[in-house]
Amino acid sequence: MRRSFERRCLIVGGVWNITTALLTIFGYSAWFKQSGTKRLENETAETMLVTSQLISDVINVVLLFGLFVLVGGVISLVIATKIKDNEIQNGILIWTGLWAALLFLAMDIIGFAVFFMAFMMYVSKNKAIKIAAKTRGNIGL
């Protein structure tokens, strides 16, 4: 069985993850920093110190999350090139399932849908490959 659908889903999902990660790293973190510092203009010195540290911590979390998604997108693109037709590769099955679950927890609905489709198609084709192998084994007897 050809794995072209799964390959396409992983490529689309990887590109989606890289795009959202870059928007998070460069767009959202810059916006959050700008709007956070604008809020500090009318604060007292004590409040400003605490709030600026809180803003810095939140920006670090945003950047770390963006980097995490970026690495996941790159891994997905690499895995898309490594998929072999007519073979069951359990590592790919584990990756797509775990990454889909993580994207679901991160509330990335589009990413979740793409990786979940790849996961379900991979599972169904694995079953078809097992049945075909079993049938070929019985014919040879």
Image (cartoon, rainbow, N blue to C red):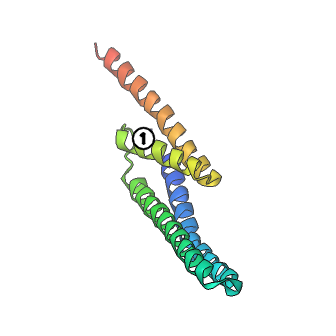
Q: How many marks?
A: 1
Query: Which residue in the structure is indicated by mark 1?
Result: 93
**Quadrant in which the C terminus is drawn:** top left
Name which residue lies at 48% across and 39% down.
122
Q: For residue 43, what is the image quadrant?
A: bottom right
The image position of residue 19, as x and y in percent, is 56, 68
Name which residue lies at 31% across and 19% down.
137
Name which residue lies at 68% across and 87% down.
41
Locate residue 86 relative to residue 46 in the image: left or right.
left
The image position of residue 44, as x and y in percent, is 65, 83
Q: Of all residues shown, which one is farthest toward the right?
A: 42
> Which of the two residues, 6 or 44, is positioned nearer the viewer here?
44
The image position of residue 84, as x and y in percent, is 37, 46
Residue 56 lies, with reference to residue 118, above or below; the image says below
Locate residue 39 relative to residue 62 in the image: left or right.
right
The image position of residue 31, as x and y in percent, is 64, 78
Q: Is residue 89 visible?
A: no
Name which residue lies at 46% across and 28% down.
128
Q: Amino acid at mark 1?
A: Leu
Residue 30 lies, with reference to residue 6, above or below; the image says below
Residue 51 lies, with reference to residue 69, above or below; the image says below
Q: Is residue 86 visible?
A: yes
